[in-house]
Amino acid sequence: MSKVLITAKTHPYLIDHLKEKGYQVLYHPAISYEEAYQLIHECAGLVVTTRIPVDRRLIDRGIHLQWIARLGSGMELIDVAYATSKGIRCVSSPEGNADAVGEHAVGMLVALLRHFRVSYDQLKEGIWEREKNRGYEIGGKVVGIIGYGHTGSAFARKLSGFGATILAYDKYKTGFGNEYVQEVSLETIFRQADIVSLHVPLTEETHHMVNRRFIHSFTTPVYLINTSRGAVVDTHDLVEALKEERIAGACLDVLENERIDQLTDAEREDFQYLLHHPRVIITPHIAGYTHEASLKMAQVVLHKLGI
Ligand SMILES: O=C(O)[C@H](O)COP(=O)(O)O
């Protein structure tokens, strides 16, 4: 019986379906990399999130491995080229959590522009403050989307009822404009955007894409939304830009170093600054984390694998 190693918490549908199809499921949602290394040589399938990296060492030990299924979108921790060169099929499931990410990005934006966090903190201190919490509407603003894949387009769709002008730029795609999104150049986004949302994968090219230079390219201070990967933004440059008011505010679901208990002194200083800034909201990488998404991701990988 073929074995499948599942290395992260998943929807029961995935386990039940694999069992129904005759797989023996090794469900270890809290497994470490080394423990996975010990089991992988027995397995035909491997299911992962970002909990453990799938590097050459793990792939080499997976002598019976036929496929790797990523519950989620980002593939930066899987050596896809190496796995593919060894005949191992790699599938991801960005279709499964894109709606969740799109909704979360919209939610964060509303929360930021309408002072949810700050006003709630004030309420807890017994302060009923209205004037200082007068907010901004999304309607009438120009929103620039960078990266028009699954989450970029989901964000645009969710945002489309708000009455904003939605611009999108994708370095690798054209012809995606539609009734609510205008396809534009990056320069147009720099010139026109009030709000910018990042929807690019983390690659060598996008690492620290949002740095001082990038931020200074905008005509006016923008609100930044990042639900992609923390390292797409140079955190220190973001902090400096907030201090200089080159960035009006930020919604961050991802951080460069998400191990907040293991930050260096410099990282901790930046993190504390962001945490306490009145126009920054941070969530712990949960944009794609919904009950619905976990089922959809399971369905997507099974469908792609033809199981
Ligand atoms: O890439 C994704 O789909 C999301 O960032 C979630 O990834 P993770 O849950 O595996 O960290």
Image (cartoon, helix red, strand yellow):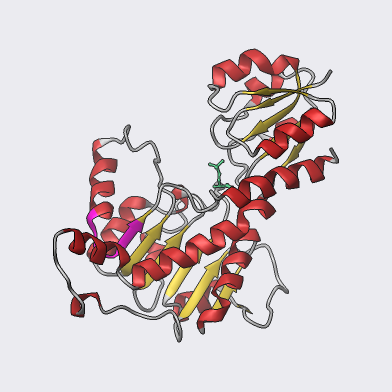
Viewed as shown, does residue 62 lie left or right of 133? right
Whether residue 111 is situated above or below residue 89 in the rendered picture:
below
Point out the image quarter for the N terminus. Answer: top right
8 inside magenta stretch: no
> Which percent across, then down, holds residue 86?
79, 27
Residue 273 or 132: which is nearer the viewer?
132
Viewed as shown, does residue 262 lie left or right of 180? left
Q: Quadrant of ligand 1?
A: top right
Residue at the image position 49 percent from the left and 50 percent from the top: 229
> Which percent across, then down, holds residue 216?
36, 69
Viewed as shown, does residue 197 lie left or right of 11? left
Residue 277 or 5: which is nearer the viewer?
5
Residue 257 location, quadrant: top left
Residue at the image position 35 percent from the left and 67 percent from the top: 112
277 inside magenta stretch: yes
Residue at the image position 34 percent from the left and 74 percent from the top: 221
Residue at far left of view: 126
Is residue 87 visible from the viewing direction of this image? no
Residue 269 location, quadrant: top left
> Which percent across, then down, holds residue 97?
62, 53
Is residue 145 visible from the viewing direction of this image? yes
Point out the image quarter for the C terminus. Answer: top right
Viewed as shown, does residue 197 lie left or right of 264? right
Q: Which residues are magenta?
A: 276-281
Residue 263 or 180: which is nearer the viewer?
180
> Which percent across, then down, holds residue 171?
62, 64
Whether residue 80 is situated above or below residue 288 in the rendered picture:
above
